[in-house]
Image (cartoon, helix red, strand yellow):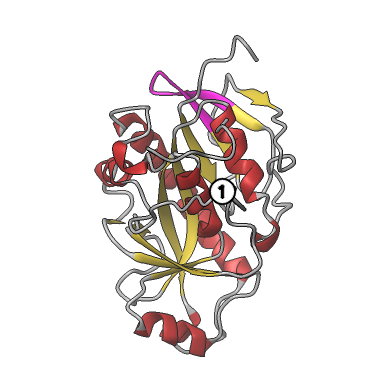
């Protein structure tokens, strides 16, 4: 691994997004204190930059949202040198004007999960700032990458539910009534773990469906979600490649350096 170029940027692919590079890929097995990540990390090149790619759910979608090795995934990326992470994901929309095929770059997050390990710091009095959960530098790069193939919204609050089930109509209407825009199953604790490891992080959300509370019918079905994601996967990958190319710096931004003046109970990888 000594000859491997440092991948300072990473992309974590969501449901249906299991590969990123066309060729010249090195797969790296990474061992972490939290076990193995979802899959070996693929390291390739985008626009002349070394980039890491990790399929969030595994190469064959082995992991459900509530069983994902979130801690191992983020630790593995950091240990390879990653400091900035794009996190494309599939989401349901809680607003009728953001229909399937819309891409949103959220700026806020609400956690409605339970029982997931969501910190590396079980002791030591470490409390990270998380008022603004996403890196504005990465968000700006993702918005800048937009073209005519995909509509991109520069805003949004994403509520993360436990899964693997979809929301009831009552839950969906409640979420929408709070003013939240998107519903997802994997955005937490991924975002806060990235912050704890001082890695910039931005979610890039592809809408696959209108959530159950927005209309009549049978509700949300997984087969339809996967079909919609697959239909938009080509343009979505191109959007992510352009976003990587649009990132000005490969180092953690000042906003995401949250441990200044804090004595940590262990050294970050």
Left or right relative to 53: residue 155: left
Q: Give the range drawn in magenta.
A: 43-52
Question: Percent from the top left, x then y, of residue 258?
Answer: 39, 43
Q: In which quadrant is the C terminus drawn?
A: top right
Q: 184 above or below 148?
A: below
Q: 229 above or below 163?
A: above
Q: In which quarter of the image is residue 42?
A: top right
- In this view, the residue in front, 88 or 79, is 79
Q: Is residue 174 visible?
A: yes
Per the image, the residue denoted by label 1 is 124
- In this view, the residue in front, 204 or 189, is 189
Question: Percent from the top left, x then y, of residue 44?
Answer: 53, 23
Secondary structure of residue under mark 1: loop
User: Does the segment drawn in magenta span residue 44?
Assistant: yes
Residue drawn 47% across and 77% down? Answer: 211
Question: Percent from the top left, x then y, of residue 25?
Answer: 60, 22
Question: Percent from the top left, x then y, of residue 15?
Answer: 58, 54
């Amino acid at each position: 691994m000594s000859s491997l170029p440092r991948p300072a940027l990473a992309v974590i692919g969501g449901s249906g997004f299991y590969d990123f590079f066309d060729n010249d890929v090195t797969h790296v097995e990474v061992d972490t204190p939290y076990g193995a990540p979802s899959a070996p990390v693929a390291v390739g090149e985008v626009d002349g930059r070394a980039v890491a790619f990790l399929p969030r759910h595994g190469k064959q979608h082995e992991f459900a949202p509530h069983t994902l090795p979130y801690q191992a995934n983020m630790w593995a990326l950091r240990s390879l040198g990653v400091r900035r992470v794009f996190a494309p994901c599939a989401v349901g929309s809680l607003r009728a004007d953001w229909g399937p095929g819309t891409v949103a770059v959220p700026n806020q997050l609400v956690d409605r999960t339970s029982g997931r390990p969501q910190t590396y710091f079980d002791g030591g009095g470490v409390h990270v700032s998380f008022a603004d959960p996403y890196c504005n530098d990465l968000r700006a790069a993702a918005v800048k990458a937009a073209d005519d193939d995909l509509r991109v919204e520069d805003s949004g609050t994403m509520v993360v539910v436990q899964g693997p089930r979809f929301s009831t109509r009552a839950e969906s209407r409640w979420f929408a009534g709070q003013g939240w825009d998107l519903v997802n199953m994997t955005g937490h604790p991924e975002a806060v773990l990235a912050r704890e490891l001082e890695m910039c992080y931005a979610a890039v959300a592809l809408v696959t469906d209108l959530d159950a509370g927005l209309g009549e019918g049978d509700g949300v079905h997984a087969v339809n979600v996967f079909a919609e994601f697959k239909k938009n996967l080509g343009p979505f990958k191109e959007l992510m490649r352009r976003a990587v190319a649009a990132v000005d710096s490969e180092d953690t931004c000042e906003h995401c350096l949250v441990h200044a003046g804090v004595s940590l109970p262990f050294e970050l990888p």
